[in-house]
Image (cartoon, grey):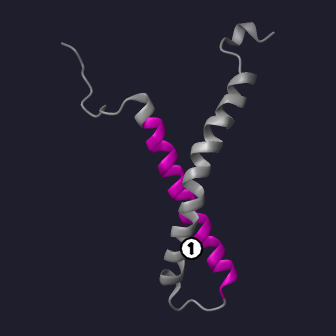
Amino acid sequence: MENKRTHEFLTKPQGYIITIILISVFMTAAMSLGMLLINLNEYTGIFSKWRKDFLNGCLIALPAGFILVPGTQKIIDFFTVSDVSSAK
């Protein structure tokens, strides 16, 4: 009997795009909230202020993720050996 996974419904390119989007959004959320907490002296209305910072951060992080991640991956792939035994 074949063990078929039912949770695989994305192609590799789709998974790559989703990964970039999620990492960009999560990092933007963490960094914008962290910077707001560091720079803010009062904590009233913090989430309304953070929402604006978060949305502005996403406008920068999402395009940067699609530009920087593939370029970084190509650089790492250039210096990475595919077979450990050939790394001598």
Where does residue 14 sit, x and y in percent of width and height? 41, 35
Q: Residue at x 66, y 11 (%)?
A: 83
Q: Residue at x 63, y 78 (%)?
A: 36
Q: Amino acid at mark 1?
A: Asp
Vertical relation: 55 (above or below) 22:
below
The residue that disc 1 covers is 53
Residue 23 is one of the magenta-drawn residues: yes
Q: In the picture, which quadrant includes the N terminus?
A: top left
44 with respect to 37 (left or right) = left
Q: Residue furthest right?
A: 88
Q: Residue at x 24, y 31 (%)?
A: 6
Q: Nearer the viewer, residue 19 or 87?
A: 19
Vertical relation: 66 (above or below) 83:
below
Vertical relation: 5 (above or below) 1:
below
Q: In the picture, which quadrant includes the C terminus?
A: top right
* Element at label 1: helix
Q: Quadrant of residue 9?
A: top left
- Chief secondary structure of the magenta span? helix
Where does residue 33 sit, x and y in percent of width and height? 58, 72
Q: Nearer the viewer, residue 78 or 3?
A: 78
Q: Residue at x 48, y 43 (%)?
A: 19
Q: Which residues are magenta?
A: 15-40
Q: Quadrant of residue 78?
A: top right
Q: Quadrant of residue 61?
A: bottom right
Label 1 crowding class (10 Å Cα cut-off): few <14, some 14-19, many 20+? some
Q: Nearer the viewer, residue 21 or 31?
A: 21
